[in-house]
Image (cartoon, rainbow, N blue to C red):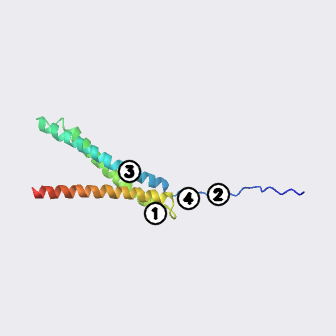
Amino acid sequence: MSQQAVPAYSPQRPPSDTRGLAAGIASIVCAVLAPVVGFLAAPVGMAGVFSQASMNEDSATGPWIVGAVAMVVGALLLCLAAIVCGLVAVVRAKGMNAGRITGFVGLGIMAMNLLSVVGIVLGTVVSVRAS
């Protein structure tokens, strides 16, 4: 009997294409955290307004208002980062890979966030005009 030669290498699987995956994950994280920071800014701002209404001096309300403005700016920066990272993930990915899918998911979450904010603003405007 003759022995068969053992191949020196085993067939390798092609490497998975994960271009854009990190940007897509960053897009999802930013899109989820942006409304959380935005909703946390509302009570901080209301605490500043209520403390200003209950006190005569303005010295105690400054940090509350600055904190609320900083949180709103943080939420806006997270929104911008979610959109930019999602676009980078979609553009950078080749084909329909994990990077492109996570980019689309992050952009979808951000679109829902922005549409809900528009709906809240329009609902508030309509209710104020009706009264």
Mark 1 or mark 3, which has the lower sequence index?
Answer: 3
In the image, residue 21 above or below residue 68: below
Amino acid type of the residue tagged 1 in the rendering: Val
Give the residue at mark 4.
17
- Dividing the picture into quadrants, the one containing residue 3 is bottom right
Amino acid type of the residue tagged 4 in the rendering: Asp
> Residue 90: percent from the left, percent from the top?
45, 61
Residue 96 visible in the current orientation = yes
Q: Residue at x 19, y 42 (%)?
A: 46
The numbered disc on residue 30 is: 3
Q: How far apart are marks 3 and 2 (CA)?
A: 34 Å
Q: Residue at x 38, y 50 (%)?
A: 30
Binning the other alpha carbons within 10 Å of mark 1 as few (below 14), some (14 to 19) or many (20 upward) gives some
> Residue 114: percent from the left, percent from the top?
30, 57
The numbered disc on residue 13 is: 2
Query: Which element carries disc 1, helix, strand or loop?
Result: helix
Residue 83 left/right relative to 116: right
Q: In which quarter of the image is the N terminus?
A: bottom right
Mark 4 or mark 1, which has the lower sequence index?
Answer: 4
Binning the other alpha carbons within 10 Å of mark 2 as few (below 14), some (14 to 19) or many (20 upward) gives few
> Residue 53: percent from the left, percent from the top?
12, 39
The numbered disc on residue 104 is: none
Circle 3 or circle 2, nearest the eye: 2
Q: Distance between the residues labelled 4 and 3?
A: 23 Å
Mark 4 or mark 3, which has the lower sequence index?
Answer: 4
Circle 1 or circle 2, nearest the eye: 2
